[in-house]
Image: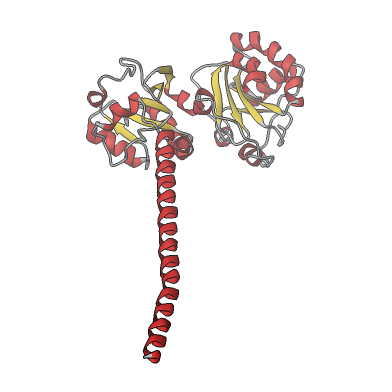
Amino acid sequence: MKRITFYLTLMAGLFAGALPCTSFADDAADTTSATSSKKSKKSKKSKKGKKAERKVGELGKKLEGITYLTANKPDFDATHYIFINSASWCGPCKAIMPKIVEQYAEMKAAGVEVILVANEPGPDAAKYLEGYNAQFAGAEPVQLNGIDIPKGQPIPNMVLMDADGKVITSGHGRMVLQWRQLTGQPVVDDGKPGAVATAIADMKFLVAKPSKKAKYYIYLHSSSTCVACKSVMPSIVKEYKKMKSKDVEIILLSHDSTEEAAKDYVKSLRTKLPTMMDADENARKLPGYTPVSGIPQAVIVDKNGNVVKQGHGNIVLEWKTLCP
């Protein structure tokens, strides 16, 4: 009897001692479950926050239901949208198309979306996009009803809108290349030589040699026979020394008929502006070079050839604002 009592007491003690282990495991499981639940809630909040950051605007909502010409679709949560009227039969359209295609990845990463508006039958426009390996979307005008896109204007033309469809600006299609300035993108200088410095290293100039250390370059289209050019040049020359000290360089692209005429023109300005003929094939190799239909015209680019602004030659006088 004593032995039976002893074994019963021993078994009870062992059983009681096992309970805390079971209880500890359950507590651990409860703690893990609670922690997992908190993480799950935190993860959901995080995802919800990210979703909130990618808010789809009114314009994005309209674009979601559109049938596009190719498999490419725009980001519906972009901050800006550029609609460009273009066509495969249009020479000026084809001149700027490669540059838009080249810059599109950077535009998209910055929240700027491009959509080609077909000015020809849909299948032709689709081939046009595919021929340039364009990664942005295209649509026929009928698909874009309700969106305020310029109609009846010579192509290429463009309109820039914000996420809610408010028109910011519109104009000639080459303005697409000014997307950084038009959408307020920050200019980042990594301190390294840019694409323009690399390009001009092996080029020959009629007068002087442009700086390889400039942060901005101004391609100034001008001629000794152009009255409008002569009227604005004195003011530009006056600013040139100030520009140089602020790492802004001018490259004069002469539209004169001969190299001698171009040299005499620069000599008459009493300053050594780096000069080459616009007809020189090297001029087309300048990063950011854009053909012009009249003079004086200026194209302001950063050191990598990204177009900051293009327009009448007198925009050079805005260099302090355009070249911070």
Residue 42 lies, in percent from the top left, at 44, 45
Depicted 20 relative to depicted 207: above or below:
below
Q: Nearer the viewer, residue 36 or 182?
A: 36
Q: Quadrant of the C terminus?
A: top right
Q: Nearer the viewer, residue 38 or 243?
A: 38
Residue 98 lies, in percent from the top left, at 43, 36
Image-quadrant location for residue 113: top left
| Furthest-front residue in this view | 1
Identity of the residue drawn at 62% across and 35% down: 188
Determine whether, in the image, residue 240 is placed left or right of residue 15. Answer: right
Q: Nearer the viewer, residue 105 or 35?
A: 35
Residue 37 lies, in percent from the top left, at 40, 51
Q: Quadrant of the N terminus?
A: bottom left
Image-quadrant location for residue 306: top right
Q: Nearer the viewer, residue 211 or 141?
A: 141
Determine whether, in the image, residue 318 is placed left or right of residue 128. Answer: right
Identity of the residue drawn at 60% across and 8% down: 227
Q: How is the image coloured?
A: secondary structure
Identity of the residue drawn at 43% across and 79% down: 14
Identity of the residue drawn at 40% across and 17% down: 167
Residue 299 lies, in percent from the top left, at 57, 24
Depicted 168 relative to depicted 28: above or below:
above
